Image (cartoon, grey):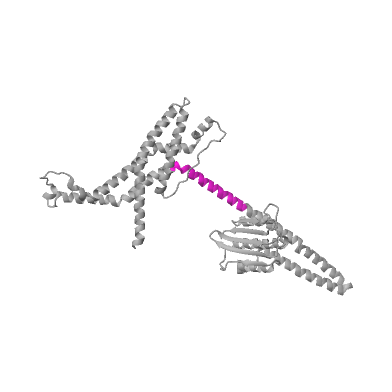
Amino acid sequence: MTTTITPRRSGIFRQLAVDTQYVLLGFPLGIVTVVLFLVGFGLGVGLSVTVLGFPILVATLFQARGFATVERARIGPVLRTRLPHPYYKKPDPDDGFWRKMLVPLSDGQSWLDLLHGILRFIPSTIAFAFVLTWWVGALGGVTTILWDWSIPRPPDNKDLNELIGLGSGDDVRILLYTGIGAVFALTLVPVVRGAAQLEAQFARALLNGVNELRERVAEAEAGRDAARAQREAAVSAEATALRRLERDIHDGPQQRLVRLAMDLGRADLQFESDPQAARATVAEALAQTRETLDELRALSRGIAPPILVDRGLRAALTALAGRSPVPVDLDLPKTDDRLAEHVETTTYFVVAEALTNVAKHSGAQECQVRLQRSAYGLLVTVEDDGAGGASLAKGHGLTGLMDRVKAAGGEMTVTSPAGGGTRLTAILPA
């Protein structure tokens, strides 16, 4: 029990010390900045009709930046966070003297720094008054018994408490002061913390508020762009898959079905004149039927392989590797835990397309497929020892696969130096 409470108490006392020094030091800093900046701003504006006013204003703004930098460093321990340095406008190296001089005057954050330096004395004074009062009340009250004797009093002083039998006046006074001090001591931590937060949050709003708002807007825009890119990738991947399916059906089963219809028509004509030839034509048509069914099964595996749905990714990839004409070394996670459906489907298509490319184009003797799960997601790696030369450039076969990976919220890279084999890597959220 002691080991768990002590760090917590030490943390509270450490934060109390941090908040106290922040407020006590902030009060004189506030007085310095309000005097310095009001004088500089007043002189700059007053002399703006002459050339001297602009340098004074610029110098005042740079002083405000310096005090703002110090204040951001002081705020960090109070707010328990590190405030980043905001963006300030900078002149171009080719700008002239006067243009460089006027750039700080058009920087909004510099004026916010100046405004903070002028107005900070308001929250600083309020916080200083509360912190000083509570510390004096707490320390003075709980130590009343140590210093009360030093206060001189008339020798014959008898107050009302003694006359009515409540005890000596000194005892009652010490008890009262000690009780008041205990109240101050018990409320010292939240009061000091609240005062420090008041001053720190005021400074944060002026010194980093615009910068934080700009960062949130940038993050929102980046998220919107990522969502748009993911949506476009999904549409592109779907269109590519449909075009490929149409081409495969047209080049394979459709042509076989046309030939099958022609063979059956020829067999119908041959039954009366040449039954033997008709039987041969029918046998050939049956063979065409079986081949057509095999092609349709292969196409259906490319759309939604049943083994993936029924038995999971491990079994589907094992079956896929078994059908590959190039020997495949599988390195899969030991666990059979199922992933999200779209992740498993995308992983299957990545491996299937990669193995197809290995068999058709690489001339590889061996291929390795590796899946690794981590805190970042599912890492899919397909590597071969072939001729290399694969590319993700538009027009290549891997472009549609990359769109499919992006549509699933992942990223894909291909490393394929000429003669050095190909390494395809995809990271998918899992």
Residue 337 at what x, y percent from top left? 56, 67
The residue furthest left is 156
Q: Tell me, yes or no, whether the highlighted magenta stretch contains residue 230.
A: yes
Instruction: Provide the major secondary structure of the magenta segment.
Output: helix
Residue 138 at what x, y percent from top left? 27, 49
The residue furthest front is 419
Q: Where on the picture, by quarter, is residue 236?
A: bottom right
Relative placement, left or right, of 317 versus 37 is right
Residue 195 at what x, y percent from top left? 35, 46
Relative placement, left or right, of 290 versus 134 is right
Q: Where on the picture, by quarter, is residue 3?
A: bottom left
| Residue for point 42% across, 47% down | 76
Residue 83 at what x, y percent from top left? 45, 46
The residue furthest right is 273
| Residue for point 46% across, 43% down | 209
Q: Tell me, yes or no, whether the highlighted magenta stretch contains residue 86.
A: no
Q: Is residue 229 visible?
A: yes
Q: Nearer the viewer, residue 84 or 347?
A: 84
The quarter of the rendered structure image containing the N terminus is bottom left
Magenta highlight range:
205-231
The quarter of the rendered structure image containing the C terminus is bottom right
| Residue for point 45% across, 48% down | 82
Q: Nearer the viewer, residue 378 or 382?
A: 382
On screen, residue 365 above or below 97: below
Q: Nearer the viewer, residue 368 or 203?
A: 368
Q: Is residue 308 visible?
A: no
Relative placement, left or right, of 1 versus 329 is left
On screen, residue 101 above or below 128: above
Relative placement, left or right, of 140 versus 402 is left
The residue furthest top is 50
